[in-house]
Amino acid sequence: MMNMDQIYLVKDIEGYSPHISRLISMMNYARHTTLQAVENLTVDQLDYLLDDQSNSIGALLLHCAAVETAYQVGTFERRALTDEEVARLEPALNLGDRARAEIRGHEISYYLNKLDEVRARTCELFRTVDDNWLHFEVPFWDGKPGNIYFMWFHVFEDEINHRGQIRLIKNKIQL
Amino acid sequence: MMNMDQIYLVKDIEGYSPHISRLISMMNYARHTTLQAVENLTVDQLDYLLDDQSNSIGALLLHCAAVETAYQVGTFERRALTDEEVARLEPALNLGDRARAEIRGHEISYYLNKLDEVRARTCELFRTVDDNWLHFEVPFWDGKPGNIYFMWFHVFEDEINHRGQIRLIKNKIQL
């Protein structure tokens, strides 16, 4: 899916509609930079907390996978998460104390596998829809309309936001 | 330019071509979240350094304005920055020691005015081009091709990355 020769191009991708292609292009670059930021991190680095209110890099990675899973359900199935799904995605989805306590001790491969697995499913699902689907509007935050393009933009924009934090945390790790 | 009723919609905007409209939609949301993160910060908060290798929130805001200015020149004039332009955009463009020493003592309005001024010019310039222009490819990083859509995606993706850092720094300010 991620063609490194095309990583600086936002353009058509075979098998996907025009706007979905551009969305995937941007998601690919965002993911590329996330992977660059975390490759070779040790378990101790992935678990490191700047202070008792901070998120570890590992928790932020698992959060990105959880957010993407939640938006798969929200946009392709157009429904809220079930209690079982919420239970499975927590504590990564909302981070905080439980994430600090429970998301620990994993190798980088654990997080990367989660991210890969969710993304592969997203790319499969994107093949089944088109640009009309992408622009479908529903009531969203603050009672304002949101469209599906925005929701998937938000998925990668949340990842970029956390990648910025991951870079900053990585620079400050003292082990 | 930023219609808050449409802030969760990535779609056509009157006066702009389809792909440029979507790009502006995403830039608007990114900017909206940047502004939310920094509104009401005091000069001391804007100048605060987590440690002697960190960037202040003020410097990160000025960096976003400088990056956008640099890409205006690179994409609309398709040329490198002149020495005079680099001198004017530094130290915000590359951050580091000089930025820590020199970007200080400004009220939030100083940074917001810079951001607004550059963005207003970007939006004017986007009216003069179309989707063909947006997909024009040139040799870019690592000798790989990059297109103008990617370059502008990078402008807002850099801002989101730094907004993530701004949120983290803000939570850790001790004054």
Image (spheres, coloured by chain):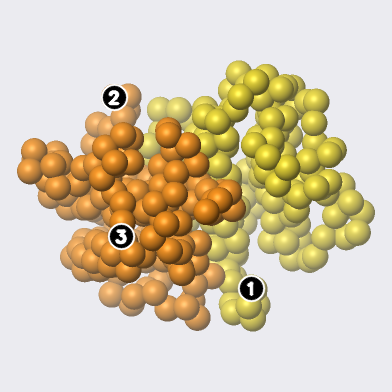
Chain colours: A orange, B yellow
Q: Which residue is mark 3?
A: A106
Single out the residue that lies furthest toward the front.
A175
Residues at circles 1 and 2 in contact by the CB criterion of under 8 Å:
no
For the residues labelled 3 and 1, the Cα–Cα distance comes to 33 Å
Q: Is residue B34 visible?
A: no
Q: Is residue A95 above or below residue A30?
A: above
Residue drawn 55% across and 31% down?
Answer: B172
Q: Which residue is mark 2?
A: A143
Q: Is residue A69 visible?
A: yes
Residue drawn 50% across and 41% down?
Answer: A50
Q: Please, what secondary structure does the residue beneath circle 1 have?
A: helix
Kind of residue at disc 1:
Trp
Q: Chain of mark 3?
A: A
Kind of residue at disc 3:
His
In this rendered view, identify the residue nearer to me: A72 or B24. A72
Q: Which residue is mark 1?
A: B141
**Is residue B144 left or right of A24 when viewed as pictured?**
right
Q: Chain of mark 1?
A: B
Kind of residue at disc 2:
Gly
For the residues labelled 3 and 2, the Cα–Cα distance comes to 39 Å
